[in-house]
Image (tube, rainbow, N blue to C red):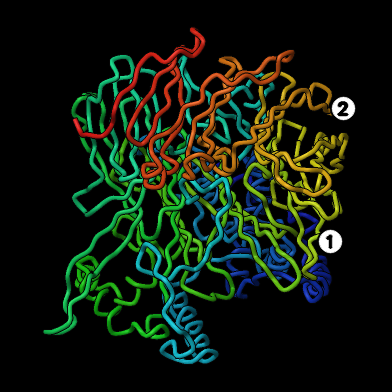
Amino acid sequence: MEDWKKKIKDSAEDVKIPEGLDPDKMQKKLEELDKIKKKKVVFYRRPAAVIGGLAAAVVLMFVGTWKAGLWGDSEKSQIAMNMQSEEAAYAEAAVAEEAVEETTESTAESAAESTEEASETAVEEDGDTADQAADEYTADEKFNSFYHTTTYDDIRGQIEDAWEEEERLYGANGSHLESAPEESADGAADVGVSESKDEASMESTTEDSADTGAADMGAADAGDAEETSGGDYSSTNLQVEGVDEGDIIKTDGTYIYAMKSSGSVQIIDAKKLKVIADIPAESDEGQCEYSEMYVDKEKLVLVGNLYTSGLQSDNADVYYMAQRYETIMVTYDLSNIDHPQKTGTVTQDGNYRTSRKVGDHVYIFSDYYRYNESFYGYETAEVARESSMEDVTESKSEGTDMEDTQLIPRVNGELIPEDDIYVPDTIDQCSYLVMSSVNLKNPDKVVDQKSLIDSGSQFYITKGSVYVIQNDWGSDQCISNVIRFQLTNGRIRGVSAAALKGELTDTFAINEYDGYLRVLLTDWRGDGRFSNQVNRVYVLDDRMKICGELNNIAKGETIYSARFMKDTGYFVTYRNTDPLFTIDLSDPYKPEIIGELKVTGFSEYLHFYGNGKLLGIGWETDPDTGATLGLKLSMYDISDPTKVKEENKILLKDVMDCTALYDYKRVLVDPEKNIIGFCVGNYSVSEDEYQERYLVFSYDEQKGFSNKVDQVLGSPEAYYSGYGYTGGLYIQNDLYVVEEDKITVYDMKNNFDKTGSLELTSEK
């Protein structure tokens, strides 16, 4: 590495300052940007000290490496990201004069250190070398005008100021409230973070488009995937190929892993239909409420919430339950499948939202919130409760500020470092989005952690990026704040952000492809008249800067579903009919609607079904009255995107609910096996009770849809206690319908005849 430093230093000694960084020109640029700044409305503005620090680092790096020529295209692109916004440009100009006055020697040394840091960061191999290199990430880089990093004292001070303002406006001790807010799972008040329909299963919580048969149409290149597996068995219905998602039902082709509503997991030998292991929902740390799991080779990963509680006394006569919720990830070794062995546990503050697995790394996201105890009349009890918690006591004994243990979230028992917390210019409440990563080769250690003092409504996650989408409702309209974090070998780094007009229907309406992000939004108008909303298409470059857009699409209608395939996008809007729009995105600077098909009803879920086919699941409606007539399956011919046709459809009149419309993980679709499976529900007319069924269809261009399986699921009592814990999977030619308490097997090669079943009511 010393040779690299010397080479950079020698090559930089005769560096000529680029014309663009001439002090006079920078001063002129500063004045011009100052005019822009006065006109521009931004959500958060960076403190001057932070601006200076960022700009100095960026300018020094740029100057020192200008002639050394060591930056590749990707590194140049990354520099551009960090300099992309007008605010960042303003910051560069503000310190350029000071930067260019540095001596050549100090400039070269700074460049050498920065280049060394970037070179080490680029290492993407596993092991200590990669982890050590990744530690050199420029954690103090700030991403545009939305967020920056600061100190614990500043964070605590801003939160306390926000609480004081809350009390000033509404009165202390919650006197304005009839009752204190309902607590969320971590013992904090529910902040009402909205959740999209596609997150109901776990985040409850997702990313690109995804389909079982998407690979036939190049979905892998588009980031669209679905049920892809290495063998002849199904996998979780994914949004992005190569980005695994947690699920309640998994298979590796030999065993079925079924998570019950209690969070316990049973491992079943698929061929023998026999339970061979049972993993309880508990941990040495407390009671676990697992939500999802991953199966990777000989590893089982469980993720969810950890609940700890204990009886505490406020005084001699008053007792209460001290309780705490954290997000937990527990890893088991399955090399001896009959006796799984726990190999690692990681925790982080807050309620579990979602997670993803990319290679050996699992990324975990949680919401952490602390409310103003005194404001809601809980000061004595809450402070006593926190004081009684063992972990807080330990933190105090180690010299950590007591207030930090309450106001700063922790990952694996350690406070998140100051440089890993991204802060807006104004803090309105003590609310964090907490992110961490774990390498399954070391499942008890955290590779990286970051936190955003804010929350996320929806998550779209690719192999290299996390997009956090926030719905910011103002007086006039909804603004979607899209915040991008970069993922590199387990490392997480804030990169850039954008504010777009409109609301994201779900995360199938956002897609990253070939360096561009495409977003479909419905822009609700503030006058209360739904007929005035419009729809928008945005295309953003790798700096999260808008480079192309379409506006005023389908006025008075709302986006209900979307899918992307490479340079083509499909989305459905609805009022009384269902226009299926086709967008050509081949030129990101000039997106164009090239097709529009109007049919009755609307599709709420779209899924590519092999070459030239698009499956739609939604509702049929009366075109005159808008009344719902039943669930509709449509197969669209998209072989010519400019002339999309509804090739076939089927109406299911006895359906009032369908999990496929809000939980894509419960959908089983495979065009090669020619199966379409999902749950539906309806009230039985004869018995006046709710009944849930699992349906499987096949499709033929000439005959249309054919119902192959119609299985009644459990009893009404089982339905209400275990809703959502039903799904379908296949292993070779066997179809398995997995319920909360039963598995049923069908032979797909023999007209879907029922061949066996297994009760899951008892442990091994």
Secondary structure beneath dot 1 equals helix
Q: Which residue is drawn at 29% across and 36% down?
A: 265
Q: Position of residue 624 (x, y in %)?
A: 84, 47
Looking at the image, which residue sits at the far front? 686
Q: Is residue 111 above or below residue 430?
A: above
| Amino acid bearing label 2 | Lys
In this view, the residue in front, 417 or 57, is: 417
697 vs 313, left or right, is right
Q: Where is residue 712 in the image (x, y as percent from the top left)?
A: 45, 31
Q: Residue at x 79, y 41 (%)?
A: 578
| Amino acid bearing label 1 | Asn
In this view, the residue in front, 271 or 300, is: 271
Q: How many marks?
A: 2
Q: Where is residue 553 in the image (x, y as percent from the top left)?
A: 85, 49
Which residue is under mark 2? 643
Q: Quadrant of residue 312?
A: bottom left
In this view, the residue in front, 431 or 130, is: 431
Instruction: Specify the quadrant that holds the C terminus.
Output: top left
Q: Which residue is drawn at 45% across and 50% down?
A: 136
Dot 1: few (<14), some (14–19), or many (≥20) neighbours within 10 Å?
some
Looking at the image, which residue sits at the far top? 750
Secondary structure beneath dot 2 equals helix
Q: Residue at x 30, y 76 (%)?
A: 401
Q: Is residue 314 above or below residue 467?
A: below
Q: Which of marks 1 and 2 is nearer the N terminus?
A: 1
**Residue 198 visible in the snapshot:** yes
Which residue is under mark 1? 532
**Residue 547 visible in the snapshot:** no
Q: Is residue 375 above or below residue 416?
A: below
* Mark 1 → mark 2, Cα distance in angstroms: 28 Å
